[in-house]
Amino acid sequence: MLVMLIVGIPMYVCATSSTPIAAALILKGLNPGAALVFLLAGPATNAATINIVRNVFNNRTLVIYLTMISVCSITIGFFVDWVYKFYDIQANVTVGMASELIPYNIRLVAAILLTALIIYNGLTNLWQQTRHAHSH
């Protein structure tokens, strides 16, 4: 986990690109907790964020920020490893098969909820645009 933290902090990896990297590392034998450390620490500590925190606040705040990212990601990493060990889950077997781990009824409810939220958002935006057009 410390190695992944050290690797993840200076890398400029966005959350979207770090996910397949972490999945590949898990397939190669990395434990899920260490992959999660990489997923959390990498995007949260990219060069742009570090420069903004340093410039807007100060170096002390930057040290606190990096320390908290490190402590929290490692703590969560240990918890994830514990969950995998407690439930005796093989991480490399479950990569790419998350849908099979979740019961069908839960997937169906989640899909319906997501669809409803997308429709609601679209209708709300349409209503606001229509209202805005009529007010001018």
Image: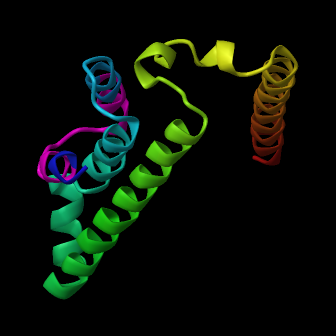
**Closer to the camera in the image, 57 or 33:** 33
Looking at the rendering, the stretch of residues picked out in magenta corresponds to 5-20
Depicted 17 relative to depicted 135: above or below:
above
Instruction: State the predominant SS element of the stretch in magenta.
Output: helix
Depicted 97 relative to depicted 51: above or below:
above
The residue positioned 77% from the left and 27% from the top of the image is: 114
Horizontal side, residue 15 vs residue 104: left or right: left
Depicted 22 relative to depicted 5: above or below:
above
The residue positioned 33% from the left and 37% from the top of the image is: 35
From the top left corner, tell me how far across and down residue 89 is, in percent: 54, 27
Horizontal side, residue 89 vs residue 35: left or right: right
**Closer to the camera in the image, 101 or 47:** 101
Task: Examine the structure image and report whether residue 123 is included in the region drawn in magenta.
Answer: no
From the top left corner, tell me how far across and down residue 106 is, in percent: 83, 25
Task: Using the rendered view, name the quadrant where residue 129 is placed.
Answer: top right
Horizontal side, residue 80 vs residue 63: left or right: right
From the top left corner, tell me how far across and down residue 56 is, in percent: 24, 78
From the top left corner, tell me how far across and down residue 84 is, in percent: 52, 37
The scheme the figure's colours follow is: rainbow
The residue positioned 19% from the left and 64% from the top of the image is: 50
Horizontal side, residue 124 vs residue 72: left or right: right
What is the tally of numbered marks visible in this picture?
Answer: 0
Task: Using the rendered view, name the quadrant where residue 22 is placed.
Answer: top left
Task: Examine the structure image and report whether residue 8 is included in the region drawn in magenta.
Answer: yes
